[in-house]
Image: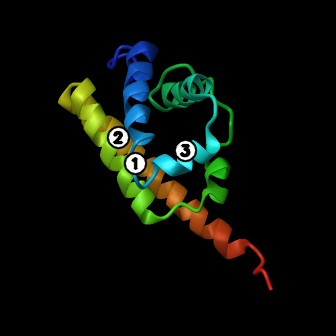
Amino acid sequence: MFDRIGGRPPLLELLRYFYADVRQQAEIGPIFAAHITDWPAHLEIIADFWSGVTGGPARYGGGMPMKHFPLGLEERHFVAWLGLWQRHCQIRFAPAEAKELTAIAETIGQRLRQMIVLDAANRPADR
């Protein structure tokens, strides 16, 4: 897929426009504003992640799921993120690639939801 979408430059362009919208989205914008201070660096890291996920060079080694555990994410956050992702993929890529990128994001989101639930269930209660 990485080659079909044109490699890293189109991925980075997708991420720039996508995260510009994310930063202004009512549900998830405040979460990102509270945790990301260097957007250019963050976009490079996310591009590394998506490069590997799509079959390109695997440069990301940052333990993505654990970084999301302390954020207090709820279903509404996943819905907002995935809705914007789908929209931007449809704008930037051919239908087959947009659908595939969306499916990958949905799978990652589902796994992340499950991991967050398990993490919360395994934490000692504050008593």
Position of 49 relative to 107 (above/below): above
For label 1, the SS is: helix
The CA distance from mark 2 to mark 3 is 15 Å
Residue 85 numbered mark, or none: 2
Residue at 66% x, 58% y: name it: 70
**Screen quadrant of the C terminus:** bottom right
Left or right of 56, for residue 89: left
Left or right of 70, for residue 117: left
The CA distance from mark 1 to mark 3 is 11 Å
Q: In terms of image quadrants, where is residue 16?
A: top left
**Are discs 1 and 2 less than 8 Å apart at CB?**
yes
Which one is in front in this view, the residue at disc 2 or the one at disc 3? Answer: 3
Q: List the residue tagged with mark 1.
A: 81
Left or right of 7, for residue 5: left
Residue at 42% x, 50% y: name it: 107
Q: List the residue tagged with mark 3.
A: 32
- Label 2 amino acid? Trp
Left or right of 53, for residue 24: left
- Looking at the image, tell me whether mark 1 or mark 3 is earlier in sequence order: 3
Query: Along the line of sight, which residue is nearer the eye, 7 or 85?
Result: 85
Residue at 68% x, 36% y: name it: 62
Q: How is the image coloured?
A: rainbow
For label 2, the SS is: helix
